Image (tube, rainbow, N blue to C red):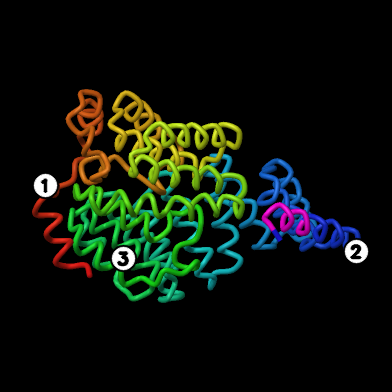
Amino acid sequence: MDVKQLHAQARADAEQALKLAPKASASQLALGYSDYYGRGDYAGALKAFAAALAFKPNDSDALAAQGYVQRRQGRIDDAIASLQKAFALDPRNSALAYEVGSTCMLASRYPEAQTWFQRALAIDPDNRNAKAFYAEAIALSTGDIPRALAAMQGDDPFLKLQRVNLLAYQRKFGEALALLASVPDTPDNFPPALNGPKVEQQANLYRLMGDEAHARPLFAQSLPVLRAQLGMLSGIGVATQWMNIAYAEIGSDQTTAGLDAVAKTLKILADNPDQVYGPGIMVTSACIYAQAHRPDLAVPMLAKALAAPGIGNLYSPVLLWLDPLWDPIRHDAGFQALLQKYAKYKPAVIYPAASTSSAAASATATVH
């Protein structure tokens, strides 16, 4: 059953539940989630969740659902209020505490977010999302990568993959490749529409260190996998997957095709506005333009993304100095102007780019 059939079945089930129990909060919740996930109909979803709350005003699930939709609409303060009310009704729910924190991050309220993540971890020390985003809040607010790494220890594959990103900011590409190699290549660890399949992530690290000889064939190897996964996705997930395809095409010297894929991504985003994932999609599009050596496209897109509501969950100006994806355009006048604009965010430690030869030698010595 493909994703469209699943959505259709979910809708039919929700409508049947509503016929059987029209005044049940759960029936309205099912209908609302069908609108939210299946149709991207945020107005319809909010109407259903409001109906659920009318039947059961203290329904923490309905309040949380309302918050999830509000943040997709860019109504961050409303979303935080809804999620805080939900948590007040269910104060031992670690997942809800995490959701409040992640929503605070959308507004770049990093100290507040860290407090909520710590609360989530106090309830459930094994909440990997809270642990990962607590560390991410440290990195995005201060650029203190060693402290962020210390906060994100653990053998869970999800945590390992987050540490791979932090090691890349330190330009420890050999260590990042070794850590990535230790993560089993399974659908659970590398699901569609996130950061790409394992082979693409390996290709990315080789490319960032300047080892194109290793990177190009791995990018080419990832493309059939990425294209096959498109049919499994819907909505904003399709846009994210086209970004992964675009990056692999750029990395395998199919620049024109890569730029066309970015255009597909941005068209989907324009048709499906999303304040949670939209800013991150814009940043990633700018990164792909940078890798294509197109500062004329990268810089305006990056500037727009950094000014967008909701950007704080995924990116912050501190990464302008740390993210190696900007290296191809780092000396462009437009990028330098962005560094001046956001100068107050400059981190205390900036990791210099290693030479191509030494980085490649390190990777060869570390990864087998």
Pointer 2 residue: 20
Would you place residue 161 above or below residue 34 in this image? below
**Eye-nearest disc, 1 or 2:** 1
Name the residue rendered at 13%, 61% in the picture: 362
Pointer 3 residue: 180
Dividing the image into 4 quarters, which one contains the N terminus? bottom right
Pointer 1 residue: 352
Secondary structure at numbered mark 3: helix
Tag 2 or tag 1, which sits nearer the N-term? 2
The crowding category of the residue bearing disc 2, from other C-alpha atoms within 10 Å (few below 14, some 14 to 19, many at least 20), is: few
Which one is nearer the viewer's eye here, 71 or 122?
A: 71
Label at residue 266? none
Q: Please state the horizontal and vertical placement of residue 101, each as a whole percent of the image.
A: 44, 57
User: Could you tell me the amino acid type at mark 3?
Assistant: Leu
Q: Is residue 105 left or right of residue 193?
A: left
Which one is nearer the viewer's eye here, 150 or 181?
A: 181
Start and end of the magenta stretch? 2-10
Name the residue rendered at 23%, 47% in the picture: 212
Which one is nearer the viewer's eye here, 40 or 341?
A: 40
Q: Please state the horizontal and vertical placement of residue 347, each as a whole percent of the image.
A: 18, 45
Would you place residue 368 above or below residue 312 in this image? below
Tag 3 or tag 2, which sits nearer the N-term? 2
Name the residue rendered at 52%, 66% in the picture: 95
Q: CA distance from mark 1 to mark 2?
A: 64 Å
Q: Please state the horizontal and vertical placement of residue 35, each as a whole percent of the image.
A: 72, 48
The outermost residue toward the right is: 19
- Pointer 2 with pointer 3, Cβ within 8 A: no
User: Could you tell me the amino acid type at mark 2?
Assistant: Leu
User: Could you tell me the amino acid type at mark 1?
Assistant: Pro
The crowding category of the residue bearing disc 1, from other C-alpha atoms within 10 Å (few below 14, some 14 to 19, many at least 20), is: few
**Is 185 colored magenta in this rendering?**
no
Q: Is residue 24 left or right of residue 331?
A: right
